[in-house]
Image (cartoon, grey):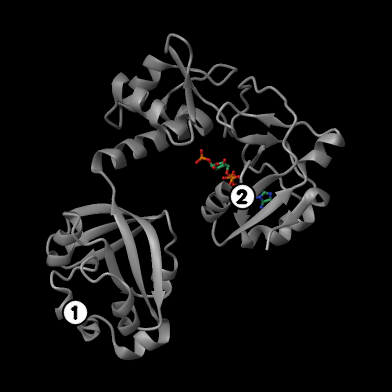
Amino acid sequence: MIHHMKLKPIPFHQMKGGAKTIELRLYDPKRQQIKIGDQIEFINTQDKTEKFRVKVNALHRFASFSELYRTLPLTACGYSDATKADPNDMNQYYSLEDQQKHGVVGIEVELVNWKDAQLEKTSRYISFLLRHHPEAAGLTLDAHGWANTAELIECVSKTRHITMTLLEQIVSTDEKQRYAFNADKSLIRANQGHSIPVDVELTSSAPPEKLWHGTAKKYMESIDKNGLLSQNRLYVHLSSDYQTAVTVGRRHGEPVVYTINSAQMYADGYIFYRSVNNVWLTKNVPPIYLHKED
Ligand code: HQG
């Protein structure tokens, strides 16, 4: 998720230059939306065309700025001389009443390279075309989900900057290995995650004893009743580790993780597939195989 925040010119440039890595804010409902891994786009209050992006690495919550100032490294919060730091400096931004009501937060961030951010946007668009809506750019996929690489480049370049070199970079650096080329790179497809009915030639295989699924708490009632359904995708997506499931769940809201008794499901005749990028897929998971992690 991407959040937007304004910043005065001095802290704006301190953060853009990498000197300031912790932003101090009230922990009000707007800031309560921020999760680790989210991105924030900071906008210069003096020139709204000036922006940069950061990724949230940690959220340090405190009851007051005094407590925060006692704990966090103040040079990282934007003070060049930590001895001059005074928690009352924050009173010009937030009333004491609001500080008491909501508490405060130090948002620890890391700059996102502009080039990487652009590549990520292009990658998301490619994923949208290869998994869900090829027709949106006039692309066609074959029955196995392959697109002609030259055609994909042509379609993407209608709206974004793309070259074969950039595409190769996207495919090789993707943190989840979402895409694959064929041997001579004339074809490209998404390894999994489709909503359109393509057969990416998954081979069924025996799952590990347990698998995990991360989702949002708001879906719990329905999942407890109906089990996990594939919704818009072809399969329910399961992770082989708990932490990945937490990250996936967070995409939808306050996360909750279900453990799947995959060994029992498999013994009962359910079919599992493991995609080439190590995501476990199955058509559905009935409630009896689900256990909620506390
Ligand atoms: C939920 C990402 C109510 C389900 C990830 C999920 C993953 C139910 C949502 C991949 C339900 C569907 C897939 C029921 C399931 N009632 N809600 N009975 N059964 N749901 O995005 O698994 O970055 O289609 O829990 O890493 O979140 O795109 O599936 O919350 O591997 O490559 O319905 O996408 O990979 O959401 O994510 P999604 P998902 P990428």
**In the rendered structure, which amino acid carries the disc numbered 2?**
Tyr
Mark 1: which secondary structure? loop
Q: Quadrant of the C terminus?
A: bottom right
Residue 26 in percent (x, y) is at 34, 77
Closer to the camera, 40 or 239?
239
In the picture, the disc for residue 242 is: 2
Residue at 25% in and 38% down: 115
In three-dimensional space, the C-alpha distance between marks 1 and 2, rounded to whole angstroms, equals 41 Å
The residue to which callout 1 is attached is 85
Q: Earlier in the sequence, mark 1 or mark 2?
A: 1
- Judge whether 187 appears above or below 158 on screen: above
- Judge whether 225 appears above or below 75 on screen: above
Residue at 34% in and 70% down: 106
Residue at 63% in and 22% down: 199
Q: Is residue 100 toward the left or the right of residue 86 in the image?
A: right
In the picture, the disc for residue 153 is: none
Rendering quarter of residue 20: bottom left
Which residue occupies the extreme top position in the image? Answer: 184
